[in-house]
Image (spheres, helix red, strand yellow):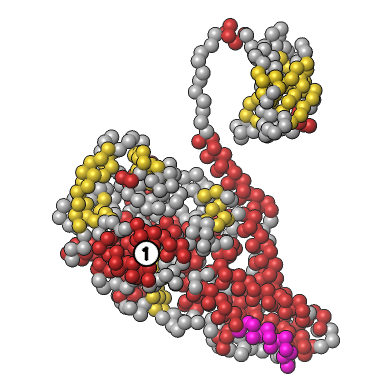
Amino acid sequence: MSKPKRYTITTALPYTNGPIHIGHLAGVYVPADIYARYLRLTGNEVVFIGGSDEHGVPITIKAKNEGVTPQDIVDKYHAIIKKSFEDFGITYDNYSRTSAQIHHDTASEFFKTLDAKGEFIEETTEQLYDEEANQFLADRFVVGTCPNCGYEESYGDQCENCGTSHNATDLINPKSAITGNTPTLKRTKHWFLPLDKHEAFLKEWILEGHKKDWKSNVYGQCKSWIDDGLRPRAVTRDLDWGIPVPAEGGEGKVLYVWFDAPIGYISSTKEWAEREGKGWEPYWKDKDTKLVHFIGKDNIVFHCIIFPAMLKAEGNYILPENVPANEFLNLEGNKLSTSKNWAVWLPEYLEEFPGQQDVLRYALNANAPETKDNDFTWKDFQARNNNELVAIFGNFINRVVVLTNKYYAGIVPEPSEFTEVDEETLAAVKAYPDVIASSIERYRFREAGQELMNLARLGNKYLADAEPWKVIKEDEARTKTIMYLALQIASALATLSEPFLPFTSTKLKNILCHSALDAESTWNDITTKEVLLPAGHQIGKAELLFSKIEDTTIQKQLDKLEASKKVNEAANKTVEPQKDTITFEDFTKLDIRVGTILEAEKMPKTKKLLKLKVDTGIDTRTIVSGIAESFSAEEVVGKRVTVLVNLAPRALRGVESQGMILMTETPEGKLVFVNPDSEHVVSNGLKIS
């Protein structure tokens, strides 16, 4: 394990235009919290910084859609997000917001410093403009086809499909997100950060300095950007929501959100330092401080190229030592989508799964998208809980505590001589802090979480092999040793689980009465101390750490997603326009009769076609129907159907079809037969009611 050090840990600032969902948690906030908790447990000096990004264009779009002000939107969602993080156990030292005055002041001063040093260039360029809305279209006010991958719903600043960043003017077939109109080009002046000026520095710092220690996805995206040649990037925008540009000629313009948002890490640190009576500068200007940004892959460029260029240009700040960005998390095989309500929202989860924060933390970490996009499924969530947390971790702790209370009234017994197995088990337990730490310090949190579960497996195996419930009948001294050692494993789990399962850790420490010890165990104590729970120590009664999650609970969540899918399908369904008007005489030409399917067989080498023999009442004829994907040949035999008998014959795959079976769709999209009324058929087969 590394020596104690000062760390500044930041997480991507979430947009305050909606609540947090599992994609945010898995990609950024759970790994960051694991890291921060671990560093504190190992005696490091940590400031863990977060906050709400309240100046993004998505916020102004949402405000327009809801007919309220942007301030109304950010006030609402900042409160929701902040409370969700607190309830979920994300241990920020400070969670701020970019609408705070301290942030406006900090970002303005940063801009003015760079401006005074000549680090910006001013250019008049053509920007997309919506004539009807009478405004320039900044980033997410414009959508179009991505020039990189062809995705037709790319935003003006970034494609959510391939992750590529670009300018709105790069889009193919751009459309205004406000009116839907095709925008025009209009000239406007802006300030630009000339990234090309810093290209040599970035090449040396990233491509040479971090080739081995940065994640391959991060390094690869940075290399691609640098190899492509860096270009000036605008730092201002024509908007009325944000931080006003503090320079002559900046009227009606604000700082571009990508410029002001990362400065939010600095202003949030300042806010924390003022509250705590500390200095903020060591956390941002001391070369011995380790700065780590936790982000998703869509923010790699901003945190690895643009923000470092800003910090380097300012001249007084440290640069990030690592940016362990994760890939994206999908949900039940589909991409998470706020607009389509295809998500698991944190506030809803906390309400529907009370007291089960750690289950979601564990499931998300176990399936974290560390090296590739991964998929969250409710069935996997259930299996992680039932088969691992309940059956392994919870089972071990419950057996240890129940047996200790049963045999010794909850008092840790005095051990006798250790066997070779006991010594090996204790040695394995003492190795786990370093094993888990090694994974965490390499940002392999999924691996670290599984090592924690391996410690619980070790405990289960030790108890199963030692069988104290049998040994108690013949060797009381040996039983005491077994239970003493099992309690040491339980105590180690109580400490080592804190970064991953903080609520469980607290509950387990309470059961084991850690607070009654002279000094509660630290991470390093597990390796160095001979005894974690001394003989004679009183523990509490057993409580279930985890509860089994039933199928009905999971089905309820799947039903919610299915309902969202149906709503989206209905909203996106293309309705065929009305056909040309016909007369009543045209209508009476249709000869519709009720028939019975006598025989049915699948047409060879086709997916959709069934060959049917149908008794129409006037004859028996062959009809080929494209219903094989909805019905088997066996299940349609004997069905009464409605048949258009005077449709001109048509050859399908060499078989002449002499009519049409009338079908329709339910609101859910299921294909069904038009229900025939066998009692009332007029002479031409048509019943009108």
Which image quadrant for residue 448?
Answer: bottom right
Q: Is residue 680 visible?
A: yes
Question: In the picture shown, does residue 8 fall above or below 12?
Answer: below
Write down the residue under mark 1: 304
* Relative horizontal placement of residue 354, taking residue 152 as reference (left or right): right
Q: Which residues are magenta?
A: 417-430
Q: Residue at x 25, y 48 (%)?
A: 238
Q: Residue at x 49, y 75 (%)?
A: 441
Q: Secondary structure at mark 1?
A: helix
* Relative horizontal placement of residue 621, taking residue 449 as reference (left or right): right
Residue 418 forms part of the magenta stretch:
yes
Q: Is residue 105 visible?
A: no
Q: In the rendered image, which quarter contains the C terminus? A: top right
Which image quadrant for residue 194?
Answer: bottom left
* Relative horizontal placement of residue 243, taking residue 554 as reference (left or right): left
Front residue of this view, candidates 350 and 299: 299
Residue 399 forms part of the magenta stretch:
no
Q: Badge 1, how many Cα within 10 Å: few under 14, some, many 20+? A: many
Residue at the extreme bottom of the image, as rendered: 417
Question: In the picture shown, does residue 247 fall above or below 571?
Answer: below
- The majority secondary structure of the magenta stretch comes to helix
Which image quadrant for residue 533?
Answer: bottom right
Dot 1 amino acid type: Cys
Q: Residue at x 65, y 53 (%)?
A: 553
Question: In the picture shown, does residue 314 fall above or below 418?
Answer: above
Q: Position of residue 97 (x, y in %)?
A: 35, 60
Q: Position of residue 294 (x, y in %)?
A: 43, 65
* Relative horizontal placement of residue 321, taking residue 507 as reference (left or right): left
